[in-house]
Amino acid sequence: MPICQIHLLEGRTVEQKRLLIQKITEAMHEAIGAKPESVRVILTEMPKEHFGIGGKSAGELGR
């Protein structure tokens, strides 16, 4: 059972996250032949203040 873990900054819609899960599942199926029903996708959202880029938080940078 392949497991794909993705870390994202907060702010995406439910529909965007559903589409991401669908596309990652399709990619795992195409790339390694995994059965779609066996693919697990874990999305971990983090506050923008918990992610730093170049010494500043993503929130400071407006990302």
Image: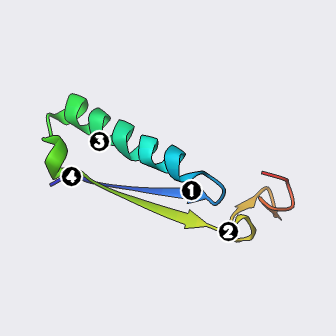
Q: Nearer the viewer, mark 4 or mark 2?
A: 2
Disc 4 and disc 3 in contact, CB within 8 angstroms: no
Question: How many residues crowd mark 3 within 10 Å: few (<14), some (14–19), many (20+)?
Answer: many
The residue under the point 67% across, 68% down is 47
Question: How many residues crowd mark 4 within 10 Å: few (<14), some (14–19), many (20+)?
Answer: some
Instruction: Give the quarter of the image for residue 53.
Output: bottom right
Q: Position of residue 29 (x, y in %)?
A: 21, 35
Q: Seen in the image, is 37 located left or right of residue 25?
A: left
Question: How many residues crowd mark 2 within 10 Å: few (<14), some (14–19), many (20+)?
Answer: few
Question: How many residues crowd mark 1 within 10 Å: few (<14), some (14–19), many (20+)?
Answer: some
Q: In front: 33, or 25?
A: 25
Disc on res. 63:
none
The residue under the point 44% across, 41% down is 19
Q: Which residue is mark 3?
A: 25
Q: Under tag 4, what secondary structure?
A: loop
Instruction: Give the quarter of the image for residue 59.
Output: bottom right
Up the image or down, 18 lies above or below 33; here it is below
Query: Identity of the amino acid at label 4?
Result: Pro
Q: Which residue is mark 4?
A: 2
Query: Identity of the amino acid at label 1?
Result: Leu
Q: Under tag 1, what secondary structure?
A: strand
Q: Under tag 2, what secondary structure?
A: loop
Query: Identity of the amino acid at label 2?
Result: Pro
Disc 3 and disc 2 in contact, CB within 8 angstroms: no
Q: CA distance from mark 1 to mark 4?
A: 19 Å
Disc on res. 47:
2
Q: Position of residue 48 (x, y in %)?
A: 72, 64
Q: CA distance from mark 3 to mark 1?
A: 17 Å
Q: In front: 34, or 51?
A: 34
